[in-house]
Amino acid sequence: MIPELGHFALILTLLVATVLGILPLLGAQRNDAALMALARPAARLLFMLVLVSFGCLTWAFVANDFSVTYVASHSHSQLPLVYRITAVWGSHEGSLLLWGLMLTGWTAAVSFSRRLPDVFNARVLAVLGLVAAGFFAFLLLTSNPFERLLPAALEGEDLNPLLQDPGMVAHPPLLYMGYVGFSVAFAFSIAALIGGQFDAAWARLSRPWTLVAWLFLTLGIALGSGWAYYELGWGGWWFWDPVENASFMPWLAGTALIHSLSVTEKRGAFKSWTVLLAIAAFSLSLLGTFLVRSGVLTSVHAFAADPKRGIFILALLIFVVGGSLCLYAWRAAKLSGGGKFANLSRESMLLINNVLLAVVAATVLLGTLYPLLADALHMGKLSVGPPYFEAVFVPLMVPVVLLMVVAPFVRWRGHELPALVKKLLPALGASLLIGGAGAWATGTPSWRTALGLALAAWVLLGSAQLLWGRLTGQGTLMARLGAIPGSWWGMWLAHLGIGVFIIGVSLVKTMEANVDVAVKLGESAELRGYTFTLDKVVEAQGPNYTAMRGVVRVSHDGQTINVLHPEKRIYTARQMPMTEASIDAGIFRDVYVSLGEPVDASTWVLRLYYKPMVRWIWAGCLLMALGGLCAALDARYRKLAKIKAPA
Amino acid sequence: MHKLIVMLCLMLATNCYAVQTGSDLDARVAHLTEQLRCLVCQNQSIAESQADLAMDLKREVREMLEAGKSDAEVRDFMVERYGDFVLYDPPMKTSTLLLWLGPLVLFLAAIGAFIWRLRQRSREQDAAPPDEAELAKARALLTNKDEQ
């Protein structure tokens, strides 16, 4: 009964979304206040309905209702309660419902914004309603999570053990918050295109929304990377897997977007860019959903075998991209203008940043889609993996990072080149020295390490100099500190985060070490000065798995620093083996042990990893997200005038 | 600040000097197997994978290197057996021309567009008519003059 209620709520959602997508838009065109007034309550109702639907599906999981197909294939009566709840978004149908919940949640949040004038608000909510209508039609027609299974299954097939992990509890919601959050920036741009009005207030109003979406996406990607690091059992943190690329592309476009928005807000320039990037960020989010969810990634042929879902998302994608670009072309004339600026100015620096980030996003897109393209055109099956992405990504990102440090020093409108060079030359020289010395000090110098460390030093020194510049001068230190706006701290922290991130990436790449060794019980192996003693291997019983648990004593300089418990689990329902690594984490290094296969009754293979500075990678991401938060909370966004209603 | 970084690097470096595990052969095997795709896995290199096929291939790579084969010979052998699909680093040929040249072309086009836009913008600004505020100021000046 309850699944039917959920199903029914979903049908109502589609109807309300359709109403929200059409009537307020008509109202805005005809200046009909009654129709426009429909937007806010409809948006909230929409969210309530999806919430009910989501609650019903969760209930089906909690109550082990195996007469629902989706529950029967992704849950199990022995699955712990927390994973029964997170199993809701463990696969296609449920994760799309989560997507829908996020979308309508953002829509409802926008409806509470009192700063938007009614006409603009009605348009924004209507655009979001249209997106929701397309999305829920897709959900109901091709991926209904409430479909019944008759006769009901006696037992579920269990959730994929890879997903039975705390990281998976938070990763999809965070990622989707980010993905779907770009729909708000998209709706703001489309609403402005329809109204033909682009002023500073429009950019200022959409900035905090975009920043919040971006910060969630950053956290989601970082968490996914952390999850892969310890759960997949071989210590990598980024694999350039198409699924990862699918989340990285919107991030790149979103990063370009928040920079472009800052110019549009402060100087009224780059309106075209801002609109295009908002369209791109959201389209790439949709494309990511398509790539991950259609099955096209495993094989073009899997897609052809069951094309219904893929074709639907593809149609939605074409409608969104095509429709917005047509609208854009129609209104492009209104998008020109903005203040004057010289060839060397903050504006031009941010423009080149946008251009380069767009190229990087396009390159990742090319590499991700190329195998599919080649296969579809019968040019043979090929793989595009980490070696390709590293070869093209690094050279493209180096200029971005170089200029990222310069840009905050450059004044709006124009700056003298000699003055700028004089200001930054000491930091540049010091960075090159640090890069060289640092790479030499690692013991295995390579130009990549030198480049990475020099770039990181450039970012950190530049950030320090920038802060110093803000804090010295007239007035007391406290007064100057207090005068720095939140958006400046946001920029500063996020850029610092990039520096910290680069340190982590370059050092872990050069100095990591790993070894697979067969160790007898009671004996030990060594790696980089750490001694790993395999005391014993015991059997352990989990709620829905049995495991062999190693007890590995890690010592350094003769002192025991930790006892690690790597596990080899067999999940009972699917009889699927899983490796559960055990990690001694530290600021400067991780020591990572995973249990391999037994060689004989008293000998086990241990995979040992020494990962220096690996935590800095995620610390960098956290700093970036924190920067996003600071910028989003900037006091300026909370006390500003309404946009004038268009005549 | 930079002192701190140097210190940091040196501090970490002592760890490396202390122990050097693994021979050159290990490093070569690791490097090669990272670039070969495990054909029975979702998306893993044979270095990462624990699948039987990946284990066999790892052993095979090691044996071939021990027998004195070069890295290129091992790669060629794998391609002959499994096709280009096995390489994570796709080779440069007609079917991958767009893949390898695409980023460069995009980059050059973007830089070109950037420079063109800057030029066009500075030309527009030179020729731009005065905006509303300037016109209003001028009008005000003119009316003041008339009144005088």
Image: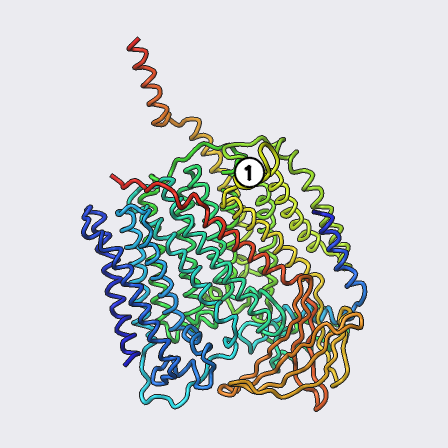
Residue B113 drawn at (x, y percent): 48, 42
Looking at the rendered structure, the secondary structure element under dot 1 is: helix
User: Residue at the location (32% across, 18% down)?
Assistant: B140
Above or below, comparing residue A436 to residue B44 in the picture: above
Q: Is residue A366 visible?
A: no
Residue A103 drawn at (x, y percent): 36, 61
Give the farthest residue toward the top. B148
User: In the rendered image, which quarter contains the C terminus of chain A?
Assistant: top left
Q: Nearer the viewer, residue B56 or A596?
A: A596
User: Residue at the location (77% across, 82% down)?
Assistant: A523
Snapshot colouring: rainbow
User: Residue at the location (43% across, 63% down)?
Assistant: A176
Q: Nearer the viewer, residue A549 or B78?
A: A549
**In the drawing, does residue A137 fall left or right of residue B85?**
left
| Crowd band around label 1 with a 10 angstrom C-alpha radius: few (<14), some (14–19), many (20+) | few
Above or below, comparing residue A593 to residue B130 in the picture: below
Residue A255 drawn at (x, y percent): 49, 51
Name the residue carrying label 1.
Answer: A479
User: In the rendered image, which quarter contains the N terminus of chain A?
Assistant: bottom left
Above or below, comparing residue A595 to residue A245 in the picture: below
**In the drawing, does residue A609 fall left or right of residue A196?**
right
Q: Amino acid at mark 1?
A: Ala
Give the quarter of the image for residue A271.
top left
Above or below, comparing residue A3 to residue A590 in the picture: below
Residue A498 drawn at (x, y percent): 59, 52
Chain at numbered mark 1? A
**In the drawing, does residue A259 fall left or right of residue A614?**
left
